Image: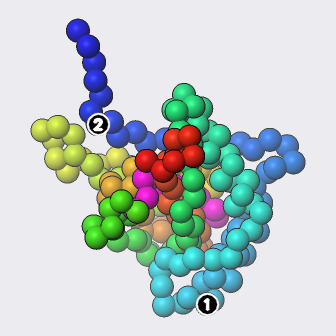
Amino acid sequence: MEKVILNEEILYYGYVKCPKGYEIDRESIKYQMMYGYLNNKDKQRFTFDHTIHLDYLGAYIRDFHYQKVNYEYTLINKEISAVILKQGESTKRKNEIDPFDIKNSPTYVLIYGVELEDNSSNVIVHYNRLKMPKCTWTIPIQNNKFIIFPAHLDYEITANTSKLNGYYLIQTLDEYIYGKRT
């Protein structure tokens, strides 16, 4: 008997543990997000200026993922944006696929907790499983925690139950095999 995997949807999650000297300064990222917010007050999700700590996070995620897929391919950054949720705010359910440009749409989504109070919000990923449509997977998002999942899956961030603002980094990623985009 032979086995062929036609479709496999995997979510990765965990805490970022960078080597000494390459720790992620979440405060630096938070301040860049706050500056971006001041320039984009009318948007819930917006881009913001680069900081070296985004490079550290990107390198950690690429190395983590590269090991998990047995060195088959690597991840390349597409877009980095920020979401700042005030008390009671949540995001709408969405995915990252552009139906008019599927080929150039990202392959994965990364959500990273920059500055959050414990148990203040969750990420809900929506998926279908064989004969069971409308399944969900819920995970609390916390400081320094990441979640990676396929970009075609709908997701949302639940209402921020904290009295403080919640800072979330959302990054879209593509996979590359031997220097060529898949």
Residue at the limit of the structure toward the top, as seen here: 1
Position in image of residue 70 (x %, y %): 54, 28
Position in image of residue 119 (x %, y %): 52, 56
* Residue 155 horizontal side relative to residue 177, left or right: left
- Does 2 appear above or below 116? above
Dot 2 or dot 1, earlier in sequence: 2
The residue where tag 1 is placed is 39
* Residue 91 horizontal side relative to residue 162, left or right: left
Position in image of residue 133 (x %, y %): 16, 47
Position in image of residue 157 (x %, y %): 42, 63
- Does 67 appear above or below 156? above
The three-letter amino acid code for the residue at tag 2 is Asn
Q: CA distance from mark 2 to mark 1?
A: 41 Å
Could you say which is closer to the camera, residue 157 or residue 163?
Answer: 157
Which disc number belongs to residue 7?
A: 2
Q: Please, what is the dominant secondary structure of the magenta stretch?
A: strand
- Does 83 appear above or below 97? below
